[in-house]
Image (spheres, helix red, strand yellow):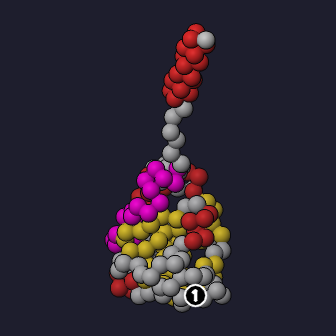
Amino acid sequence: MRGLKVLSIVAIGSSVVFFGFGCKETQSPENKAGKNVLFDLQVGEISIQTELALLPEERRKGLMHRDRLDEGKGMFFIFEKASAQRFWMKNTRIPLDIGYFSPTGILMEIHAAEPFDLSGVPSRSKRVQFVLELNRGDFRRLGLRIGDRLDLKKVAKMVVLRGFKSEDYGLPQG
């Protein structure tokens, strides 16, 4: 009986050691730098602290359910491919400006969006790959204009810091 007890303890201990060393904690890509980490987005000469929305669920949620957005801060959305975009304001309490950018990083359009508006703010262009949401009036206040360009190398680094491959988003290797 004593031999059986010792054998059981050895078997359990071996299993713990074997599986303990064989398994390592993995970190999901979206948590490498953290979902809520602020990144410095460079648009022309202006640097803006933004959250990065890469995953479909992050893009769907956006700035919903927030009571405020600090001045000069925003949310930056990156899509795998360029297409027409339509951003709505479901459960979004903050009046926003929405900037639509081309795949080459050119700011093409700026639109005002009203809180809780479900009709959506469609892009005129069918080639939008990046979208920046800021507080209403921040594009003007910061001096951002149509034609300003994103620093796509910095955008690529943001993607890599989040644990994703920049080339999956058509960006230079970060």
Q: Is residue 152 visible?
A: no
Query: Which amino acid, by three-letter code, is at mark 1?
Result: Phe
| Residue 78 relative to residue 68: left or right | right
Instruction: Please report the residue visible at 51 percent of the width from the left and 34 percent of the height from the top.
Output: 24
- Local packing at callout 1 (Cα closer than 10 Å; few below 14, some 14-19, many 20+) is some
* 77 and 128: which is toward the camera: 77
Please state the horizontal and vertical placement of residue 126, each as a whole percent of the image: 66, 74
Q: Is residue 113 visible?
A: yes
Please state the horizontal and vertical placement of residue 8, each as a whole percent of the image: 59, 18
Please state the horizontal and vertical placement of residue 87, each as a whole percent of the image: 60, 79
Instruction: Please report the residue visible at 52 percent of the width from the left and 65 percent of the height from the top.
Output: 53
Q: Is residue 48 above or below residue 92?
A: above
* 12 and 36: which is toward the camera: 12
Instruction: Please report the residue visible at 63 percent of the width from the left and 78 percent of the height from the top.
Output: 86
Residue indicated by mark 1: 116
Q: Is residue 8 above or below residue 74?
A: above
In this view, the residue farthest toward the top is 3
On the image, which quarter does residue 142 sit in? bottom left
* 2 and 38: which is toward the camera: 2
Secondary structure, mark 1, is: loop
Please state the horizontal and vertical placement of residue 129, each as a whole percent of the image: 58, 67
Q: Quadrant of the N terminus?
A: top right
Instruction: Please report the residue visible at 57 percent of the width from the left and 57 percent of the height from the top.
Output: 169
Q: Is residue 160 above or below residue 12?
A: below
Magenta-tinted stretch: 29-47
